[in-house]
Amino acid sequence: MPMLTRRRFVAAAAAGLVAADRALAAGGAAPNSAGTERPQSRAPANACDCHFHIIDGRFPPPETVKPPGMTFDDYRLLQARLGTTRAVPVQPKNHGTDPTCLLDALQRFDGNGRGIAVLRPDVTDAELRRLDTGYVRGLRFSVWNPNDTVAPITTIEPLAKRIADLGWHVQLHMSGDQIRENAALLNRLPCPIVFDHMGRLDPGKGPDDPAFATIAGLIEKGRTWLKLAGAYLNTEAGPPDYPDATRTAKAFAALAPERLVWGSDWPHVTEKHKPDDAVLFDLLTDWAGSETTRDRILVDNPAKLYGFS
């Protein structure tokens, strides 16, 4: 990539978003997302999508499958459709522990992106500093399915100790049962915690799942956050309203609206039939209970958690 001055890079980044907006206006759809209509609820200025994945075959490792339609430019089409401007890409399993694709996306977001990486405990201090400079702000541990885990539960605590002084957090994709079973570990971590996908509680129990109380106790200590994302991962009833997931989301919104952020979970890698992202975005208004709380979840909370100015 040729060297760019900051002014030229900002102009190029802005041009990319404008081009995506024009493509959407001309009838172009964002890949891996059903529908083409914009959300009924308008995104506020500086709204942030705090959970999605960029998957690009140009980046390592070469041996993993990287489906089409999941690149940075593809995501820009979704961003233009939803009206969000800030972004938190989360490194997917397709890129293992190599952060090259993530760092490329963060550079192209030009200050409007913060990233969540996946690493092993043998990462060097120099690499952590490099990632911090590149706007990485946390590490993800997706252990919900032990069969495809890249960074297992045993690596959470040693890495948490490594990143605490950087001000990073650990992001945990655990089932409700795993959260409850590992409560002692979670309570002694030296850095903030962010739970993925509403804690993956039992959809039939929702806030009556014992793990809800575990998460609530961690939130009360002041260092824990939760992502309102993945309605389709927290439901037995299904779309379009996901009433069981909605019950859980509303319970968290009543508990601690100041500790919630929202994410699209695009490109919805778990879903054979892709959801309509405009519908998922509009669900947040119902979950939040008011436009003021919704805007707090979309703007103020991400600014505090990820360090947006």
Image (cartoon, helix red, strand yellow):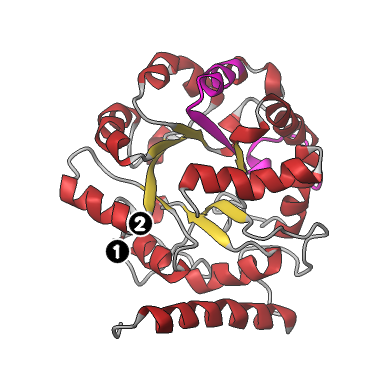
Q: Which mark is residue 95?
A: 2
Q: Is residue 277 above or below residue 252?
A: below
Mark 2 / mark 1, whichever is N-terminal: 1
Q: Quadrant of the N terminus?
A: bottom left
Callout 2 amino acid: His
The image quarter in which residue 292 lies: top right
Residue beneath label 1, please?
60
Q: Is residue 27 visible?
A: no
Could you tell me if residue 92 is visible in this image?
yes
SS class, disc 2: helix
Amino acid at dot 1: Pro
The span picked out in magenta is 213-241
**Secondary structure beneath label 1:** loop
Residue 191 pos. (x, y %): 37, 30
Query: Which residue is pictured at 75% across the width and 39% down the height?
Result: 288
Q: Is residue 232 left or right of residue 225?
A: right
